[in-house]
Amino acid sequence: MPENLLQIIGFTLACSLPVVFVGALALRALRDRSLTASMAVLVLIPTLATLAGITGVSGLMFNAEFRRTSLVLLLVAAVTVPAAVLLGREQARKTVWEKQVREQERAAEKSRRELVAWVSHDLRTPLAGIRAMTEALIDGVVADPADIARYAGQIDRETRRLSRMVDDLFEMSKISAGALHLDLGPLDLRELIDEIYAAHRATADRAGIGFTAEQPPAPLPVAADDHALGRVLANLVSNAIAHTPPGGKVVIAAGRDNGHIWTRVDDSGPGIAETDLPRIFEVAYRGTAARSPVADEGVPTGSGMGLAIAAGLVRAHRGAITAANREAGCRFEIRLPADTG
């Protein structure tokens, strides 16, 4: 048994340092695996190192004083290790939550950058057309009354398109900021579907597309803002008609199951590219088959944010919206909680 100070220091370091080294290796091995295990090892290292140092200094003489000291250390370990496990689990949950928040913030920032770039591009097109036609009218380049009327009509259409884009941007900003306020009230979803069907039947007929509505005889009660939910359904139906070739079919159906009210819009168009499906409801995302109505000249007639707004409005109703390809065409489905009040 060492008696002088240098011997005590030497024996203590010789016995405790290997424990610390092994503990450091264990921490290194666990750094990418379990935070809880790492916390337990971190607590055990000083306790076991102390026990090893005391064992070395005692000269392996397990007398009463050594047994008392060892018992204290074991009791300390019995208390601190469970506490470290609990703290490790809490810290792990916090770390995962913070990681998810950071990922969401990065995704939101990326979406905002894409939105700014996309809006800048899409605003530039109608503004350039309006400016060119206005200058032609002011400079007298266009003098024929028929041409003047045609230019005026085109300016009116482009202005309306810009107005819709601004309205959609304002709506999307409210949804993103959580400032959207809905006037929820009892609504039979069948009545809203009847209105959507009546509003789009003529458009489908002109396009040579079969358009039908399938609904059950029983009411489909939901707590909804009829204007907001009507906007969602109108967007889905207009997209389905725009992407269904002549001779195709669009069906809007509704029903009830498992305490939820559902409505589906099916089309027989080309469907959605599988790479686009996960991002189809993102703001400013346009895939290879963007689900936005397109005019004959290939220019989108709307803002292109219809599906992103639809998803935000459905979430505000505590519902969910999904998109999936079928054997022929695709299906958009909305599920809302049934109104039991």
Image (spheres, rainbow, N blue to C red):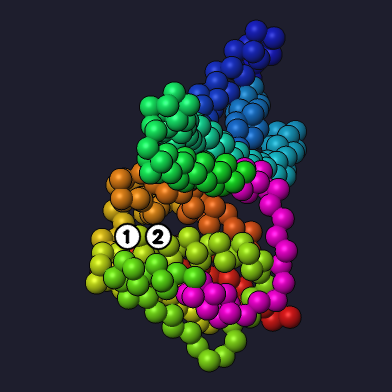
Question: Which residue range is magenta in the image?
Answer: 171-198
Asked whether the viewer can see residue 309, the reply is yes
Q: Can you identify the residue that label 1 sits on?
A: 243
Disc 2 to disc 1: CB gap under 8 Å = yes
Q: Is residue 188 magenta?
A: yes
Q: Please tell me which residue is depicted at 39% across the width and 67% down the height of the picture.
A: 203
Task: Give me the residue at 68% from left, 52% from top.
Answer: 180
Main secondary structure found in the magenta portion: helix
Q: Position of residue 107 (x, y in %)?
A: 50, 38
Asked if residue 253 lies in the magenta stretch, the reply is no
Query: The residue under label 1 is which amino acid type?
Result: His
Local secondary structure at mark 1: loop
Q: Taking 119 as reference, is 228 left or right?
A: right
In this rendering, the answer to whether 277 lies above or below 227 is above
Q: Residues within 10 Å of mark 2 (few under 14, many from 20)?
A: many
Q: Nearer the viewer, residue 131 or 14?
A: 131
Q: Which residue is mark 2?
A: 239
